[in-house]
Image (cartoon, rainbow, N blue to C red):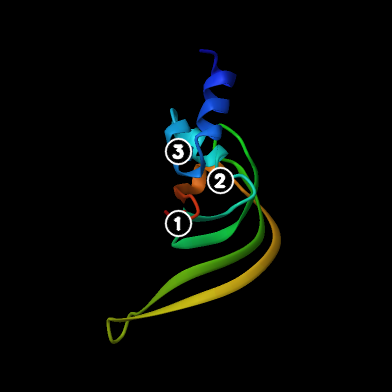
Amino acid sequence: MTDVASANAAAAAGPTSSFSMVEEPLDLVRLSLDERIYVKLRGDRELRGRLHAYDQHLNMVLGEVEETITIVDVDEESNTQSVRTVNRKVPMLFVRGDGVILVSPPSRAS
């Protein structure tokens, strides 16, 4: 059976078999195109947005992005830490793949 035929057969089987089409790690990202995904980046940054494009290096173009940055401030004198988060919304964002730690596909209802 060719790759196209097997993909068509899996698609015809219904939405619950979409994870059976995952044979390589990037297949999971491919199945998330035009869906909202969660991306964890280096430097305590998190993104939630719609995946428009990606490549083999996990460079990504995200739309409707909500970025959350966690900042830990340390007071040298009292040796205390304070944690704060900064949120911002960005209409379109290019994410360089070497900063990506984790990509999570959208949650799929069973």
Sequence-first tag of 1 and 2: 2
Query: Counting other residues with Cα less than 10 Å from the Cα at mark 3, is it few (<14), some (14-19), or many (20 or more)?
Result: few
Identify the disc placed on residue 59.
none
Q: How far apart are marks 2 and 3 (CA)?
A: 14 Å
User: Element at badge 1?
Assistant: loop
Q: Residue at point 56% right, 45% down?
A: 32
Q: Mark 2 points at which residue?
A: 32
Q: In this view, does 28 lie above or below 99?
A: above
> What crowding class fits label 2: few (fewer than 14 Cα within 10 Å), some (14-19), or many (20 or more)?
some
Residue 27 position in % (x across, y down): 50, 34
- Would you call the spot at circle 1 few (<14 residues within 10 Å), some (14-19), or many (20 or more)? few
Marks 1 and 3 in Cβ contact (< 8 Å): no
In this rendered view, identify the residue nearer to me: 93 or 51.
Answer: 51
Q: Residue 109 carries which label?
A: 1
Identify the residue at horizontal 60%, vertical 52% (top origin). 35
Between 44 and 35, which is closer to the camera in this rendering? 35
The kind of residue tagged 3 is Ser
Cα separation, mark 1 vs mark 2, equals 14 Å
Disc 1/disc 3 C-alpha distance (Å): 12 Å
Q: Which tag, 1 or 3, sits closer to the chain's start?
A: 3
Task: Return the residue found at the far right.
Answer: 91
Q: What residue is shown with label 3? A: 17
